[in-house]
Amino acid sequence: MTVLSFDEQGVDVVYEGHDFRLEKSLIEDAIDKPYPEITDHEVLRIVEKNASPSGEARQISEIVD
């Protein structure tokens, strides 16, 4: 299970027992959109190639609000 914790500067990730951080600029470069417009599902796909997100995608601007 992958856990994503969003804040205004990036995302803390727990993936397969490893904790790491994805910085805002890295995420923006990978997805080619401004950070607030990126969705949680898009970030999950950066971490897990074969991710199967459930539920409705939410923009980071809605999560960090």
Image (cartoon, grey):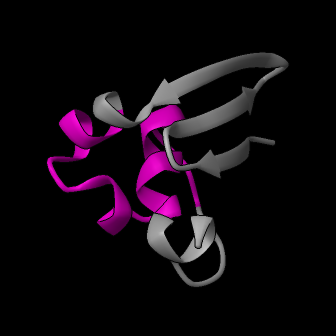
Position above or below: 22 against 41: above
Q: Is residue 55 visible?
A: yes
Viewer-proximal residue among 23 and 49: 23
* Quarter occupied by the C terminus: bottom right
**Is 37 included in the stretch rendered in magenta?**
yes
Task: Residue 62 in the image: state x and y as whole percent.
Answer: 53, 77
What's the residue at 39%, 37% (across, down)? 24
What's the residue at 57%, 84% (across, down)? 56
Task: Residue 27 in the image: state x and y as whole percent.
Answer: 34, 38
Looking at the rendering, which quadrant does residue 25 occupy? top left
Position above or below: 33 against 46: below
**Is 64 included in the stretch rendered in magenta?**
no
Left or right, 33 with reference to 44: left
Viewer-proximal residue among 36 and 50: 36
Q: Is residue 58 visible?
A: no
Which secondary structure type mostly characterizes the magenta part of the structure?
helix
* Quarter occupied by the N terminus: top right
Where are the magenta residues, as a range?
27-52
What's the residue at 75%, 18% (across, down)? 19
Task: Residue 55 in the image: state x and y as whole percent.
Answer: 65, 81
What is the residue that sits farthest to the left in this orientation?
32
Viewer-proximal residue among 60 and 54: 60
Position above or below: 65 against 5: below
Left or right, 31 with reference to 7: left
Tell me how many marks there are. Answer: 0
Left or right, 38 with reference to 49: left
What is the residue that sits farthest to the bottom in this orientation?
56
What's the residue at 48%, 64% (across, down)? 60
Task: Residue 14 in the image: state x and y as whole percent.
Answer: 76, 30
